[in-house]
Image (spheres, coloured by chain):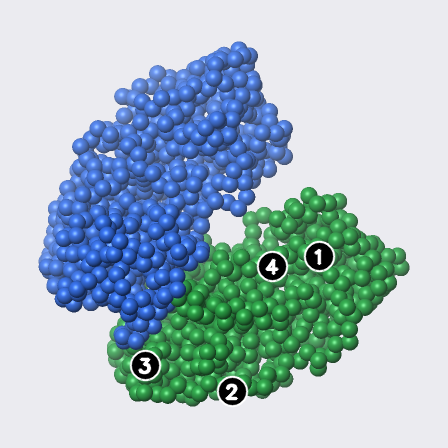
Chain colours: A blue, B green
Amino acid sequence: MKNNQFARLNVDLETAIDELQQIRFYDEPIAKATNGVFTYRLLLRKAFLSVKTGAGFDEKLANYLATPTLDLSNWLDQEKPVTATVFYRVALQLLGFSVDVDFDLTDPLTAMRTIQLPLHQSKQVTWTKADVLAAWYLLLTTHTKTGQTYLDHLATNGYFTNFYTLPTDQKPLFFNGKAQPVFDTATLIREVVYVESSVDSDHDGQLDLLKTEIIRPADTNTGLKIPVLYTASPYNQGTNDEAGESMTHNVNVALTAKTPDQTRYEDIAYQPDQADTLPQPRAVNTETTIAAETFGREASYTLNDYFLARGFAAVYAAGIGTLDSDGVQTCGSVEQTQATVAIIEWLNGSRKAFTNRTDQVAITAWWCNGSIAMTGRSYLGTLATAAATTGVDGLKTIISEAAISSWYDYYRENGLVVAPGGFPGEDADVLAVETFSRMLAPADYRRIKPIFDAELATLQAGMDRESGNYNRFWDERNYRKNLSQIKADIIMVHGLNDWNVKPHNVERLWAGLRGLPITKKIILHQGQHIYINAFRSLDYTDMMNLWLSHELYGLDNGATTVLPDVLIQDNLTPETWTSYQDWAEPSVSKQRYFFANDALVDAPATHSAQSFNDHLPEAVFNQYRDHNEQWQQDLLTDSKNNLADARLLMKTSQFAKDRTIDGNVAVHVSVAVNQPLGLLSFQLVDYGQSKRFNVSPTTLNAHGLDLGYRWREDALREFTLANHTTPFKMITKGHINLQNRQHPWQNDELKPNQFYDVDISLQPTFYHLPVGHQLGLVVYATDFGMTVRGNQDLRYSIVLDQSFVDIPFK
Amino acid sequence: MKNNQFARLNVDLETAIDELQQIRFYDEPIAKATNGVFTYRLLLRKAFLSVKTGAGFDEKLANYLATPTLDLSNWLDQEKPVTATVFYRVALQLLGFSVDVDFDLTDPLTAMRTIQLPLHQSKQVTWTKADVLAAWYLLLTTHTKTGQTYLDHLATNGYFTNFYTLPTDQKPLFFNGKAQPVFDTATLIREVVYVESSVDSDHDGQLDLLKTEIIRPADTNTGLKIPVLYTASPYNQGTNDEAGESMTHNVNVALTAKTPDQTRYEDIAYQPDQADTLPQPRAVNTETTIAAETFGREASYTLNDYFLARGFAAVYAAGIGTLDSDGVQTCGSVEQTQATVAIIEWLNGSRKAFTNRTDQVAITAWWCNGSIAMTGRSYLGTLATAAATTGVDGLKTIISEAAISSWYDYYRENGLVVAPGGFPGEDADVLAVETFSRMLAPADYRRIKPIFDAELATLQAGMDRESGNYNRFWDERNYRKNLSQIKADIIMVHGLNDWNVKPHNVERLWAGLRGLPITKKIILHQGQHIYINAFRSLDYTDMMNLWLSHELYGLDNGATTVLPDVLIQDNLTPETWTSYQDWAEPSVSKQRYFFANDALVDAPATHSAQSFNDHLPEAVFNQYRDHNEQWQQDLLTDSKNNLADARLLMKTSQFAKDRTIDGNVAVHVSVAVNQPLGLLSFQLVDYGQSKRFNVSPTTLNAHGLDLGYRWREDALREFTLANHTTPFKMITKGHINLQNRQHPWQNDELKPNQFYDVDISLQPTFYHLPVGHQLGLVVYATDFGMTVRGNQDLRYSIVLDQSFVDIPFK
């Protein structure tokens, strides 16, 4: 295995000793210790927390080998000098690595390097007391075999329980630039308030109240002011899965011709409505500091759980249109953004909240230091992105994971209805119904139903599933229009294989942020639509700790420079994370491959046109309709299968050396179709027999990651190689309506059998193509997993030498 | 969905009120309430725990519909009489069922019946106060949509937190015959002691010390004596996965001929060795009541976690040959059983333990009431079974899940090496190495390695992988020899699709217990090798609570008669559990089907012999060797595939009505083979296109089941139907060495090409075969998943009309 740590700070000895003193590893006896080995023994005694007796300590020491033949207890008794070899032989054992499996007893230093664990460099072979202290400091910051620092490992065994009672002026406690778990999670305070938002989305003449769940350490009751990790999740009060599913649109429908028009962006750009007169805020009857409602188990994000032990509050709100809140679901509207921001405004002191919905008893976030971060994945990260684009005060940073930056890029593409991967027929209305959790309260739903039904009808008209075009509805839901307002620093995390929230969402956001005076970082992993905070090979949680300690507590820990700007997981070798200067930078040089018969070639070859027809025999169509996986497999399989006449499949020759594709792959085709309508789809493919990553991470240990001491747990995970080889893997894909050749908002004329130039940028990628493999491009029409499936007699012809793909090679 | 509750007690009104008073639902205001609706409002107020204000309570009430048009708050204000329809309309909402999805608002009573939720029967339409109280009591004992009682649901929201400080003489607190979570899991005490066993398995001249982890409520420190759930798990101090894997035996080896002999059982029966002189027990220097070691996170069983909140201690011990204990791994030996029992002897006061391994400071289980149960699955349940057969005092009951009752039935079958499903090449030595966790302490391992290696060599000789025969080694590991010593009551749980620990293990145990004067119960589910305590459709946890409250606290709750003796999950309809009088009862009538050409028929048909050859082309063999799933699929597929000449496949005609197979399927064949060696395998198959259960349960909610209040959580699961139909499913299987026709310990002569009668009992089953399906029997030799795979030229001939299968139909 390989360890990758990016959040570890190198400090000088003085700082190390000072910090060791703060976490009570350096104390009076150690100060008085006269040499390295005495110091070492005293440090070890503090690390063996479970035993109360000297004999018990010796028994535990006797489990470890200090030399290949001498146990640690006996070795310490000999009072010989500590050496790097002894120290790291023991260190590997303390970190949970196994003899023979992970390292060779005779050569621990090589193992340290191979596993990528940091080594203390000493000028002398026999270590001084200073060496031992410096190495111990380093060890505490080093990851164990189960993906947490050794100090966190000690913490999960109770190391910091004696720190729970520290006075508030000594909290939080930072070590190596990161907040430590000195807060008792058994005494967390959980309370509910109702934040009065600035919107009246259900038009009942009252500003929408938003149920807000707060979890904060008890220390806040004795004066500690702390920052907040706020997660806005429309899902977290429950969902209407059956109702949502019943709304799913039929995708087995024909693509239809659109009337050509000259629509300009200005014609469809979103402008706020003439402001309706908003209701007056509620009057305040009295004020209190004590909440009147609590809750059981929130729908938590384990990253927030980790920080609850470290001096951060967690706040969850589901927003308008959810159980116990007012309003309706609008799926990405400006009103939803305003409601999302309302919670932050309450936390920063500029907005009111009440203890219940009736008594008008106001309550402030008196325990909050005014610094807020937003966290969460998918819709949660989306709302974090939306909130950031308002420039709201107090929002210092967002960590947006797998987030939508424009809803058009989620449900549409180039004038087509294109579903999130795995969810054919889903659309904005389906998601609105699914998350409208007021439905879970039957009496409340009965009251709100007529209003929601009307809103839903408006939403359905706005999303315009018929044309698939970009319009005012989608422009309202394009957060990238407002990037210039962003004041918060941003960390983006996205899966390079995320076909749910596709990579254009993060890439276009990243591109839009390039020139802005904020700190922005991006992490790209090999997952689909997942969280990565429990991965063994990456210190993601430590990175976020370094980041949030800096952003929310103002700690001067160098987080903005220590953390890489661009961090990308390799797709060939597990546990390999590399930092880069940039990603998908437009000026990356591109290599052009022209279409040819079954081949991608360096220069235009043949002027002939190749054709394929999208129509399939009914039995074949039905089979693919019901088994999208089989369709995808056949599509990329280079054989005379059911799809052989329904696609073009072209390959480069084998690559003579490794290459890395970085960014947007652009395709240009000269295409004609036999009807006045049509669509094209493209998949860029890595061809070559290889053991590739499994699609989903492997769970190494279902309860392997403690988030604190006797607190919540997460499943430790890692991407692993599949047991068997596969012949290909899709790298990226794209779709376009041939009537939207210029703009997604404008319908172009499409005359049957006339050739048109079409340009499309596929979803951006970062892909390491190994030597000997071939790049392939598959050109087809119906995408059984994402587009409508009309099974129409649409015959597409492509002029080969006028068509090409541009590959950005790093 | 369908609810199945077997642990609910029906009580009279007086008892109900008394119990409601104990859990503080019945109090002074309710005693004074003058009618049903006032009573109802007061009860609801206690159930809405999260809100502190009257207005907040009214807001929550306003979420529920009391009538199709009136919310519960308004309805209560009208002070109309409570009716069954109103009560159960609200009850369904309180239990988490969804309008339209789970029930129709206009007809809640039908939904209650359909979901199998209990209804209070009243003589009058308008309910009296007594009706409301009785119905409320019933509601508290009724399961929610997420598979726990409504009272447990309230508990997970904090209902019982005010009970934590109850004086010890009022604890534990029982309701409806089951212990309630009135113990604070945030203050659990965790301690380690070292129990001195009665064995010296590592021959170091000292009795083996066994590390024992104890978790007990803090109330024990103030005088409460409590029982123990003891889980003996050789895995729970860690495992040596890589070392174990490297030991895995090559199964691509030839079957060899065995020399005929006349071995009798008496020749190989296990008798204890002449007792070596055992070391003297350690002297006691001092005694203490305070442990000197604690621990972090134990490897827990979630059922134990649930009971930790309810007044039961949990004790985990890994036994001899594990990290921090003495001894060596022996895989099922008598010494291992004695070591397992040593923990119980300490708990019952008849054995010593020490605070560490050195100081000889003795500590008793002074907090224990002397009543112990054992829990756990697989090896854990196996050791529980082993312990029960010693008749040790204090062991009141075991809940043995998926347990081995004879190790021969785990690693061998009828003179053959037969692997646990999914683990070809595993054997007793592999498991011994895998669980020898002293290897995880490198210095300790260095000291013990020579002794363990010698023990391992002895173990390998004893298990005799060459012959596959039953011998002294296996006889020592046959716990069923000692059933008559059992004093503990037993609950057995086993999966009817468990091909790891195969069903003969539980069936032969069940059969052996029939005549014994203990209470025994059996639960058979449709899973493989799994736990079932987090299934939504069955109140398994409640059943165990009723059981253990009775067995360990002596509560007179009728558990022995209330709980069904035999409870079996249906394989056709999800969420269907039925109680029976018995299972696999030998006198069940049998239907005989004779072999015919491709058919199973009612009367002998043709005297001809059919043949098949076990030898496969090398490419086919290699394919099946690497892809056992493909082999299994082809084996049962009735087509001219690669295995068509390597098996007989016979089917009955379609069944005209549903039938249920109950117990042991017996096959008799007249067989000849062309060499002096051979084996036969059989699979009984259900043929017919159907949507069958998914192989593994579906996770409904990853954190859906709270085990207490802010305590650990489990994933809520249920068996669901697959999305697609399949043409067949294996019901059961069996294997036999043709040289072990009479006994697994005796080698019979096998002359080439001579016909012999062979009888075999397949693994027992309980299988509901639907109308229109066919029963199939596949006769073959090499089982790629379980037997050796010699790919030998072995031609088997079977005389059809002298061969038959007897099916026990219920």
The chain to which mark 3 is attached is B
Q: Is residue A230 left or right of residue A402?
A: left
Secondary structure beneath dot 1 equals loop
User: In the image, what residue occupies the spot 17% across and 37% down?
Assistant: A487
Q: Is residue B518 left or right of residue A382?
A: right
Do pointers 1 and 2 mark residues of a single chain? yes
Kindly identify which numbered label has been placed on residue B277.
Answer: 2
Kindly identify which numbered label has been placed on residue B254.
Answer: 1
Q: Quadrant of residue B144?
A: bottom left
Kindly identify which numbered label has been placed on residue B249.
Answer: 4
Image location (x, y in percent) of residue A757? 44, 15
- Going by the numbered disc 3, the residue's amino acid type is Asp
User: In the image, what residue occupies the spot 56% across and 49% down?
Assistant: B723
Give the mark, 1 or 2, whose residue is nearer the N terminus: 1
Q: Residues within 10 Å of mark 3 (few under 14, many from 20)?
A: some
Label 4, label 3: how far apart the Cα atoms are: 43 Å
Label 1, label 4: how far apart the Cα atoms are: 13 Å
- Going by the numbered disc 1, the residue's amino acid type is Ala
The chain to which mark 2 is attached is B
Residue that carries the numbered disc 3 in the rendered image:
B359
Give the mark, 4 or 2, whose residue is nearer the N terminus: 4
Q: Does residue A105 sit above or below A554 in this rendering?
A: below
